[in-house]
Image (cartoon, grey):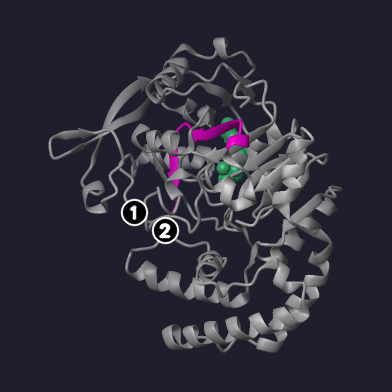
Amino acid sequence: MKKNSKNWQTVVVVGAQWGDEGKGKVTDYYAKKTDYVVRFQGGNNAGHTIMHGKHVLKLHLLPSGVLHKHNTVVIGNGVVIDPFVLFAEIQELKKLGINIKLKISERAHLIFPFHILMDTESDQMMAKKNLSALSTQRGIWPTYADKMGRVGIRVVDLLDKQIFKKRFDLLFDLQKKKLSALYHNSKGLNKEKIYQKFVKIGKKIRPLVVDTSIELDQAYNQNKKILFEGAQGAMLDVDHGLYPYTTSSNTIAGAVCAGVGFAPQKIDRVIGVVKAYLSRVGGGCLPTELTDDTGDLIREVGGEYGTTTGRPRRIGWLDLVQLRLAVRVNGLSSLAITKIDILDVLSEVKICTGYKYKGKILKEMPADLSVYEKCQPVFKTFTGWSADYHKTRDYQKLPINMKKYLDFIEKDLGVPIEMVSVGPERNDTILK
Ligand code: GDP
C-alpha cells in the first residue's frame, strides 16, 4: 500500500461526524489531482455546497469533484439514484459550461415516486413518535429497503423494456398496497404515467451505464488516481452511528468496497473530514449540544442550515468520544479540520474528552440509547484566538491558541492533521 500523504493512488474522503463537515471543499481540493471521482453510498439526500467562481453550487447526487472537468465521475452500485434529479444536476452544470464525463453502475437501484411518498408519510409518523433522524424525504430508505427485500429495480433492469415492465408491475402494486394500507395515500400515483416517464429517461441513461467495478479496476491497473467521495458522516452510519437517528446506508470507508466493487487492499488512504465544532439535524442525543447564545452565534456565523432542506442545524462542541469511533471504524490515515475560522468569534472553546455516566468516565460511544441519554460531557476548555491569521498559509503561523486546540485533537485521536480549512474559498486552505 502507498500510504503516505504524497505517494498515493486511491483516497477515500469521509465525514467523521454528522455530515456537513465541509467534505465538498476537501474533495474538491483532492479532485485536482485525481482522474476519477466516485460516489459509493447514499443518494440525493446528501448536499455539498461548493464555490465555482462566484457561483454557489449545491449538488445532491453528483459528487463535488465534478468541478474538475478532467475527472471521470462514477456513481457506484451502492448509490440509490433518482434519475430526474441526476439529469437536473447535469443540466445545472452544463449551464456553467461544465460537461461531465459520467458513468453509472448498472447495479445501482432506482428511486421511484412511490418511494418518495412512502418516505414522506413514514417520516411524518416517525416524527410524531420522536424517532426520526428527520428524513430528507427523497425516497432513500424505501429504495434501500426494496433493494434488501429483493424487489428493487436496478439501472440495468430499466434498459430492457420487458424486464422493466415485469419488475415495475410487481413493485408498483406492492408499494401501492402498502401505502394504501398504512397511510391511506396512494391516489396521486399513476402507474402508466410513471412507467412511461421511466422508460423515457431510461433512454437518456443508457449511454452512461457501465459495470463500474470493472471500469475502476481497469483504471487502477492503468495507474489512474481515484477519489472515493463519502456522503453524510460516521455518526449517521446505519450500523455504527446513533441508530435509529442515522441515514439508511453505511457511510464509512469500508462501504467503498461493497458500494463500488473495489478491493479493500487497493485503498491507500482514508481522510476524515472534521468540522472544528459539531452540527447535525434530526433527533437523538447530542451530549455536547449548545442550546444557548453560543450555539446560536456559531449557527449564524457558520451558516449552519441544511443544504437540502434549509433546516437550522443543532450545534455542539467538538466531541472526541464520537471521533474515536470515526477514527477506528474508518481507519483514518489523516484528518482535515474545517471551519475553524467560525470559532474566531469566541473567547473560549471547548472539546469533549469523555462522558460521565453513573460516576464513571466513558471514552467510547455507548450503543444503548438509554445510557447515551444520561451521559454528561466532560470538557477541556481552551482560550480563544484572534482572527488576525487569515492571510497566512503557513500552519506554524496560525495563532498559538488555535494550534493548542488542534494539537490536542491530533494527540488524543492519534491521527495527524493534514489540512486545516480557514474559509470557504479554495485557497483558504492550509496544509500541515
Ligand atoms: P458537506 O456536505 O460535508 O460538503 O458540507 P456542506 O456543503 O453542508 O458544508 C460546507 C459549507 O461550509 C459550505 O458552504 C462551504 O463553502 C463552507 N465551508 C467549508 N469549509 C469551510 C471553512 O473552512 N470555513 C468556512 N467559513 N466555511 C467553510
Q: Is the residue at mark 1 in contact range of ligand 1, meaning its CB lies under 8 Å from it?
A: no
* Residues shaded magenta: 265-281
Locate the C terminus and report the quarter of the image it occupies: top right
Quadrant position of residue 123: bottom left
Quadrant position of residue 200: bottom right
Residue named by callout 1: 284
- The residue shown at (31%, 49%) is 285
The reply to whether discs 1 and 2 touch (Cβ–Cβ < 8 Å) is yes
Q: Could you tell whether 67 is left or right of 16 in the image?
A: right
In the rendered image, residue 183 lying in the magenta stretch gets the answer no
Up the image or down, 110 lies above or below 234; here it is below
Residue named by callout 2: 133
- The residue shown at (73%, 76%) is 198
Mark earlier in primary sequence (1, 2): 2
Residue 166 placement (x, y as % from top left) = 67, 84
Q: CA distance from mark 1 to mark 2?
A: 7 Å
In the image, ligand 1 is in what quadrant?
top right
Up the image or down, 88 lies above or below 33; here it is below
